[in-house]
Amino acid sequence: MNDDCIFCQILNERAPCYAVHETRYTKTFLDIFPATPGHCLIVTKDHYQDIFEATPDAISMVGHVSTLIAHVVKEELQSEGVGIFQLNGAAAGQTVFHYHMHVIPRNTGEDLTIHNRMPGDPAELEALAARLSTRAYSMRVDD
Ligand code: 5GP
Ligand code: ZN
């Protein structure tokens, strides 16, 4: 764990989050600057800066959970598409240096930005997290 890392602070419950899903190895919560409504982040419970530090097992678990969360956002929010990606290093646009995967609901005609400078509305984030969480725990990854 890294005391200066915002994702570690969320994992330690020293910072709040809009939680969606949790496994032994991962936690999924909403991005508070959502590219689109329902933008989720899947983070490893251990602190790895990026893909070059993360273990193959941790990366596999995040990949496994990203499949579940893709189904969850597509079904719950009826999105046409889902973007799944992650960034490594400032040169690649990474801004939080704790390994994580973005899962972003996408619809035709929307701006394909990754980072939004506008924070989401707290009430909307809370309601979305509750819907996505209920859906996530009702599904199996191979549903
Ligand atoms: P990166 O640029 O490193 O791939 O993505 C980091 C993401 O974390 C960004 O999309 C940013 O909006 C999000 N983010 C930054 N600070 C916080 C925070 O305190 N809480 C949450 N939930 N997301 C954050
Ligand atoms: Zn961290």
Image: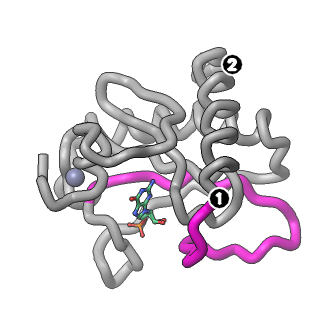
In the rendered image, the vertical position of residue 94 relative to residue 71, given as above or below: below
Marked residue nearer the N-terminal end (2 or 1): 1
Whether residue 27 sits left or right of residue 5 in the image: it is right
**Ligand 1 quadrant assignment:** bottom left
Q: Spatial distance from mark 2 to mark 1, Cα to Cα?
A: 31 Å
In the rendered image, the vertical position of residue 7 relative to residue 88, given as above or below: above
* Magenta region, main secondary structure: loop
Q: Secondary structure at mark 1?
A: loop
The way the protein has been coloured in the rendering is: one colour
For the record, the magenta segment spans 98-120
- Within the magenta stretch, is there residue 60? no
Q: Which mark is residue 143?
A: 2
Q: Tag 2: Cα neighbours inside 10 Å, few (<14), some, or many (≥20)? A: few
Front in this rendered view, residue 11 or 45: 11
Q: Which residue corresponds to the image point at 31% horizontal and 23% vertical from the top-left?
A: 24
Q: Which residue corresponds to the image point at 79% horizontal and 42% vertical from the top-left?
A: 77
Q: Quadrant of the C terminus?
A: top right
Q: Position of residue 128 (x, y in %)?
A: 68, 41
Q: Quadrant of residue 36?
A: bottom right
Q: Position of residue 127 (x, y in %)?
A: 68, 39
Whether residue 33 sits left or right of residue 143 in the image: it is left
Q: Position of residue 68 (x, y in %)?
A: 59, 31
The residue positioned farthest toward the front in the image shown:
123
Inspect the image, locate mark 2, and give the three-letter code of the amino acid beneath it.
Asp
The residue tagged 1 is: 121
Q: Position of residue 73 (x, y in %)?
A: 70, 40
Q: Secondary structure at mark 2?
A: loop
- Within the magenta stretch, is there residue 106? yes
Front in this rendered view, residue 15 or 56: 15
